[in-house]
Amino acid sequence: MTDILTDIANGVMTITFNRVEKKNSITSAMYAAMADALALAQADAAVHVVVFQGHETIFSAGNDIGDFLNAPTATQDSPVFRFLRGISTFPKPVLAAVCGPAVGIGTTMLFHCDLVYAGDNAAFSMPFVNLGLCPEAASSYLAPQLMGYSRAAEALLLGEPFMAESALEMGLISRIVPPSEAAALAQGQAQKLAAKPLNSLIETKRLMKKGQTSIVAERMAEEGDSFGRLLREPAAREAFTAFMEKRKPDFSKT
């Protein structure tokens, strides 16, 4: 799997989106590779921290539409849901370095990261409604909790991008730096964490997240059911057809 690179060094597993020519859009095989990497990192006591990163110009454009249409999400055991469950329940610290666009799951996965360092070129968006779909990754719960309902409604109902400054103000990201510095900052912070007692890191994270764990799991499952249903409806078919035909979708008859 060359589209997802994994490396372990000094207690840190780095997972890199390596499909820049396709804007780091994520295929089913990439989700499977990331789910497997998280499982390995959780089981390996030598790994204290996980860092996700993309490229200085692009974090991820979200789902690969062609791959998604050929193998749509069908069950809770599909690779995307394995990945979402893995990152949402991962007991050790998870960091991300985000530069350029972070679309769809490129944004929603960040709700499950503990520290996010963004380049000043980062642009976040959750355009699910524009595709005739609904949020995933428990973002329908986590976005209002983090951003407040009004800002979450703008992000999820309008699906319009918001920039790094807004993401910092909302609390989605931890710091803004030049794109050339984001990955190095994330790695530096990861090394600080890796030097700390693992059991203390795990227990502190567990205590901070206590109370939302079961809600997140339930909401993620409910979103998955709704997502699958909406995917079969006319609005989603029109949205994806328009995307492939490079035109604006017309929802007036759906």
Image (tube, rainbow, N blue to C red):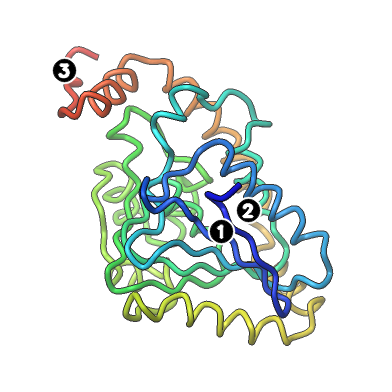
Would you place residue 67 above or below residue 101 in this image?
above
**Mark 2 / mark 3, whichever is N-terminal:** 2
Depth check: give the residue in front, 71 or 203.
71
Would you place residue 13 above or below residue 89 in this image?
below
Name the amino acid type tagged 1. His
Is 110 on the left-hand or right-hand side of 199? left
State the CA–CA distance, disc 2 to disc 1. 5 Å
Is 199 on the left-hand or right-hand side of 220? right
Q: Quadrant of residue 78?
A: top right
Q: Quadrant of residue 248?
A: top left
- Mark 3 neighbour class, 10 Å CA radius: few under 14, some 14 to 19, many 20 or more: few
- Mark 1 neighbour class, 10 Å CA radius: few under 14, some 14 to 19, many 20 or more: many
State the CA–CA distance, disc 2 to disc 3. 37 Å
Answer whether labels 2 and 1 touch (C-beta < 8 Å): yes
Q: Secondary structure at mark 1?
A: helix
Tag shown at residue 88: 2
**Mark 2 / mark 1, whichever is N-terminal:** 2
- Residue 2, image x and y in percent? 56, 50
Q: Secondary structure at mark 2?
A: helix
Residue drawn at 26 percent across, 50 percent down: 154
- Residue 157, image x and y in percent? 29, 41
Residue drawn at 72 percent across, 87 percent down: 195
Name the amino acid type tagged 3. Ser
Tag shown at residue 252: 3
State the CA–CA distance, disc 3 to disc 1. 36 Å
**Mark 3 / mark 1, whichever is N-terminal:** 1
Tag shown at residue 82: none
- Residue 82, image x and y in percent? 66, 41
- Mark 1 highlights which residue? 112
Name the amino acid type tagged 2. Ser
